[in-house]
């Protein structure tokens, strides 16, 4: 994850612990993906082997983890957007 937004320069690490709520959003994404892929695996393979489901779900979690991390932070920023305001002169004002 970038430390600053390449477009507007917003510092993503606003304060320690700010994105802890993003872990819950990421968890919700992971649960939705695992349930969807588990049902799709059951529908398309009709397998009763737990190893097939474990392999598919662990692979999905591993593949989608970077997406979930970034997208959950993005969702959190949009949800809390009235509280997060970008000021391009903030660091300059601090140095004065």
Image (tube, rainbow, N blue to C red):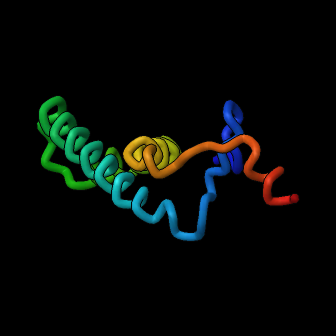
**Which residue is the extreme one toward the bottom?**
16
Of the pair 14 and 73, the residue shown nearer to us: 14
- Give left or right: position of 35 versus 11: left
Q: In this rendering, does residue 59 appear at all? A: no
Of the pair 90 and 69, the residue shown nearer to us: 90
- Give left or right: position of 84 versus 37: right
Of the pair 23 and 54, the residue shown nearer to us: 23
Of the pair 33 and 18, the residue shown nearer to us: 18
**Which residue is the extreme one toward the right?**
96
Q: Please give the name of the residue rendered at 38% of the width and 52% of the height, measured from the top-left corner.
A: 26
Q: How many marks?
A: 0
Split into 4 quadrants, where in the image is the C terminus?
A: bottom right
Q: Position of residue 81 (x, y in %)?
A: 45, 44
Q: Please give the name of the residue rendered at 71% of the width and 35% of the height, measured from the top-left corner.
A: 6
Q: Position of residue 21 (x, y in %)?
A: 40, 61
Q: Please give the name of the residue rendered at 47% of the width and 42% of the height, measured from the top-left corner.
A: 74
Q: Position of residue 78 (x, y in %)?
A: 43, 41
Q: Please give the name of the residue rendered at 35% of the width and 60% of the height, measured from the top-left corner.
A: 24
Q: Position of residue 20 (x, y in %)?
A: 45, 65
Determine whether 91 is above or below 74 in the image.
below
Q: In this rendering, does residue 8 appear at all? A: yes
């Amino acid at each position: 994850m970038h430390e600053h937004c390449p477009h507007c320069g917003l510092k993503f690490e606003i304060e320690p612990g700010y994105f802890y709520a993003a872990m819950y959003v990421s968890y919700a994404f992971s649960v939705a993906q695992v349930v969807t892929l588990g049902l799709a695996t059951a529908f398309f393979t009709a397998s009763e082997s737990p190893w097939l489901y474990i392999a598919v779900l662990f692979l999905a979690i591993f593949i989608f983890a970077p997406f979930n991390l970034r997208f959950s932070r993005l969702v959190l920023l949009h949800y809390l957007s009235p509280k997060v305001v970008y000021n391009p002169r903030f660091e300059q004002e601090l140095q004065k």
